[in-house]
Image: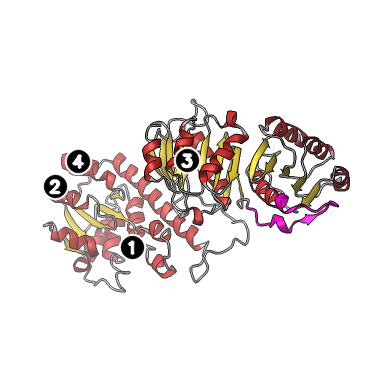
Amino acid sequence: MDKPIRRALVSVFDKEGVVDFCRRLTEARVSILSSGGTARLLQESGIEVTPVSEYTGFPEMLDGRVKTLHPKIHAGLLAVRANEKHMADLDEAGIDPIDLVVVNLYPFEKTAATDGIGLADVIEMIDIGGPTMVRAAAKNHASVGVVVDPSDYARVADEIRDHGTLSGETRLGLAVSAFRHTASYDTAVHGYLSRVDSDGTLRESDGMPAKLQVEYGKAQDLRYGENPHQKAAFYRDPLCTTPSVCSAQQLQGKELSFNNILDFDAALGLAAELDAPSCVIIKHGNPCGAARAQDILSAFQRALECDPLSAFGGVVAFNRAVDRPTAEAMAGHFFEGIIAPEFDAGARERLAKKKKWRLLETGDLERFARTGWDLRRVCGGMLAQDWDAIDENVRESKVVSKRQPSAEEWSSLEFAWTVCKNVKSNAIVYVKDDRTLGVGAGQMSRVDSARIAVQKAQSPLEGSVMASDAFFPFRDGIDAAAEAGIKAVVQPGGSIRDEEVIAAADEHDIAMVFTGRRHFRH
């Protein structure tokens, strides 16, 4: 530890703890250079500061865009102390070495995620001088310390107080944090600019990126992953501004688990796609009940009727605020948690008795949208795709059967198609009167999914409709549906045996519509 800390350059946007830190530095006889708002704050706090403009002899200009971009700053940071020529160059130019840099960057991510913010305001949050100083100090970490995180202030101050300097190990660790900080920052800037037009509006994707850059910050550590022997954590997309599990406020209950998060996300995604007051119950990633009604109490009761056995220990999502009557109805059952735009005072009071239940409040779901890419890891690589969305209008789908769907059947087909998209393939969903009656999920054979959905049904299927996430390769699925009393079917079509399948529908007097779009969910 032979490189004493004599001079520090301090310029931070996040000023948490910086006054106390700089006071400790001055007590350790470290002189401080500073600029802009940081310099004013330190001076007002009684800390002796040399303004950067005074040190460089060059004023701040361009509304603060140019403050620290000067040879006296960067030569002082980049000079290798063990290099005699470097030190001679500094002497000849009258430049003092800078031994410590304390910098954190403009809040680009926070600004870019703010509703209604203009492109010009976001551009002003692209820091230039800050990253330049951070990178210079981190490159020269053999000679210079660099602090970008206020949580490091205390230990850095302690080490300088005790030893007058920082160890090589400390400087290296700080440099690693610094490069992670600038890398994250640049990724956020790239991610934002690559998604907007020149006027700041969100741009529709015109293809897959040549390079995929992902920079998520850790939201929380989890007790374990899908199973107790797996380590896990939950990471947040800094550019996501829509209601989500990650941004939801947890009002009560145990900490979220890995599987909870997956189920809450699936539940919220389906609930947000439904228009009328709706309820969705998810278990192991699949809907075991979904319904829409005139009010959320009725929606919950109708959703639960689909498969109350599977609903035990599931999660519940609503697309409207939860009121006390709905809370009373749920309290007689066991759920892992509930996610909703809001819980009114009566619901909060009633559900407070369910201390272990997780309550997540998202805010208004009108802005819900899945942004960015749908990413999935495989060994040695990453798959990326657009998020699946129902852009097709079921009511405008091609009717391929002799019989047209009735008005009631059209409504049920529309609802069934939305639910089916959210069921793992092979997926079959039976619906009547805007509620699921049976769900067949994740089977290797589509006809098995159809039969399982029949077996799971708690109510008669006579007069209901069926949705299939992909085409029927054989007529046996339609024959099974007819045997159960199905009166209308929605499916993508596209099988080489479509004529055979259509003929089966006509034989059973089933109305059939082709959407032309598949919705696999693996």
Looking at the picture, tell me which residue is in the foreground, 52 or 210. Answer: 210
Residue 61 marker: none
Q: Which residue is mark 3?
A: 326
Number of marks in the rendered image: 4
Of the 4 image quadrants, the one containing the N terminus is top left
**Among all residues in the image, which is located at the extreme top?**
229
Q: Inspect the magenta stretch and tell me whether residue 62 lies in it.
A: no
Q: Is residue 483 visible?
A: yes
Q: Which residue is mark 2?
A: 28
In the image, which residues are magenta?
A: 389-410
Pointer 2 and pointer 1: residues touching (CB < 8 Å)? no
* Residue type beneath disc 1: Gly
Compare marks 4 and 1 and give the one earlier in the sequence.
1
Mark 3 or 1: in front is 3
Which residue is drawn at the image coordinates 35% and 49% (left, top)?
A: 178
Of the 4 image quadrants, the one containing the C terminus is top right
Q: Which residue is mark 1?
A: 129
Which residue is drawn at the image coordinates 72% and 54% (left, top)?
A: 407
Q: Secondary structure at mark 1?
A: helix
Q: Which residue is mark 4?
A: 158
Label 4 to label 1: alpha-carbon separation: 28 Å
* Residue type beneath disc 2: Ala
Q: Inspect the magenta stretch and tell me whether residue 390 lies in it.
A: yes
**Residue 135 vertical position relative to residue 477 in the rendered view, above or below:** below
Image quarter of residue 188: bottom left
Compare marks 4 and 2 and give the one earlier in the sequence.
2
